[in-house]
Amino acid sequence: MNQPVKDTELIQKVFAANSENFNSIALEIFHFQYQHNQVYQAYCRLLKIEPGTVKNITQIPFLPIHFFKTHTVVSTGFEPAVIFESSGTTQTINSKHPVKDPGLYVKSFTSAFELFYGSPGDWCIIGLLPSYLERKHSSLVVMVDKLVRLSHHPHSGFYLYDFEKLQAVLLELEKNKQQTLLIGVTFALLDFAELFPMKLEHTVIMETGGMKGRRQEMTRQQVHEILCRAFQKETIHSEYGMTELLSQAYSDGKGIFKTAPWMRVLIREEDDPFAVYDKSEKTITGAINVIDLANIYSCSFIATEDAGKLQSDGSFEVLGRLDNTDIRGCSLMAV
C-alpha cells in the first residue's frame, strides 16, 4: 500500500518542477488531492476513476471550473487566510477560492515574474486596475500590489482613474529611459489610449483581459492593434490567470502564452471532456485544461471554459470562451 503523500514534501517539489519530473510531481499531487479534497474525490468517484490506474497527466481527472461557484474546493481542512473571488458580472455567480497559504501564491507569481521579466527591482510597475481595486478579494490586485512594493520605484503604484497624472508619470519615465511595466485591465487601457496616446519606447504594456461590460466585445488581436497604434508599440504583452489558480502564464506578444515550469496547459476535446492531450508534434485545438502544481491546497487540475490552441513546444493561445458558458468579467474577449 502506498504511503500517504505529505503536503510539506510536495511544496518543496513544486518550484523545482521541470520537464523531466513534472509528470511524477503532478501524479503525487493528484493522489494527495484525491485523498484530502472531498469535492475532487467525489468527482473522481462519479467518473469511476481509481487512483491506482492513473499513470499519466492526461489520465488525471480535471475538475470543471464551475465547481468553484457551487462548492468549497479545498484540500485538507483549514481556515482560509484569504478568499479570492472572481469579478464576474451582476448576472453571474462569482467563483471563490479559499487560500490556506498566501505565501504559496506570492512565491508562484514572483518566481514567474522573475523567470519572464527579471527582478521587479529593475522595473517601475504601474497598475491600471480601477474596477479590481474597488473589490476586496481580487487575486490580481494582490499580485500587482506585491510587485509594486518589490519594485521600490517612487512612481510605482496604482493610478485608478487619474489618467492625466498617469500620462505625466509615463512621460517622465520615458524621458529617464526607465524600464516600466504598465499592467492594466483591458477597458482601462483602451480608455487611456483614446485620451492620451503617446510613444512608449521603454514601457511594456500588459493587458490582463477584462471588459466588464464597459465596451463592445473585441478580439485580443483588435485590442492589441488599438494599443499598438496608440502607444507606437510593436507588441502588447498579456497575462493569463484566474481566481481558481495560483499561477499565471505570460505572453510577450501575438497572444502566445508560456507557462512557468510548475504550470502546464493541456487540451481536451470540446465534445469529449475525457479526451485530453498533452503537447505533441502538431498543434492541438480544443478546450483548455490547466495543471497548476502550486495549487496544492485547492485543486491543481482545472478544466477551464476557455478554448485554446496548444503548440508543440507547450506554448498556447487563448481563442475565447466556449459556447454556453458564463462570461467572466476577466475574460470577455473572443477570437
Image (cartoon, helix red, strand yellow):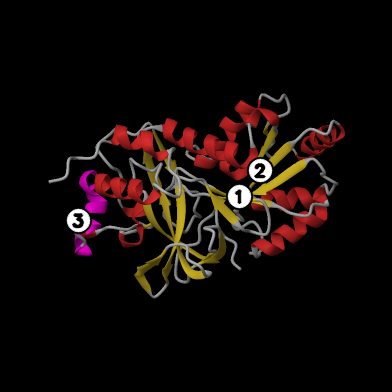
Q: Which residue is mark 1?
A: 208
Magenta stretch containing residue 44, yes or no?
A: yes
Q: Quadrant of the C terminus?
A: bottom right
The answer to which of marks 1 and 2 sits earlier in the sequence is 2
Taking the image as drawn, is residue 72 in sight? no
- Quote the CA–CA distance across marks 3 and 2: 44 Å
Q: Secondary structure at mark 2?
A: strand
Taking the image as drawn, is residue 163 in sight? yes
Q: Which mark is residue 52?
A: 3
x and y, in percent, of residue 293 in the image? 39, 45
As drawn, 203 above or below 222 = above
x and y, in percent, of residue 187 in the image? 67, 53
Q: Secondary structure at mark 1?
A: loop
Tag count: 3
x and y, in percent, of residue 303 in the image? 39, 59
Q: Are marks 1 and 2 in contact (CB under 8 Å)?
A: yes
Tell me the mark number nearer the camera, choosing from 3 and 2: 3
Q: Amino acid at mark 3?
A: Gly
Label 1 packing within 10 angstroms: few (<14), some (14-19), many (20+):
many
- In the picture, measured across the screen, residue 70 lies left or right of residue 332, that is left
- In the picture, measured across the screen, residue 306 lies left or right of residue 117, that is left
Residue at the limit of the structure toward the bottom, as seen here:
271
Residue at image coords 48%, 49%:
242
Tell me the mark number nearer the camera, choosing from 1 and 3: 3
- Quote the CA–CA distance across marks 1 and 3: 39 Å
Magenta-drawn segment: 34-48
Report which quarter residue 275 is drawn in: bottom left
- Quote the CA–CA distance across marks 1 and 2: 7 Å
Q: Which mark is residue 183?
A: 2
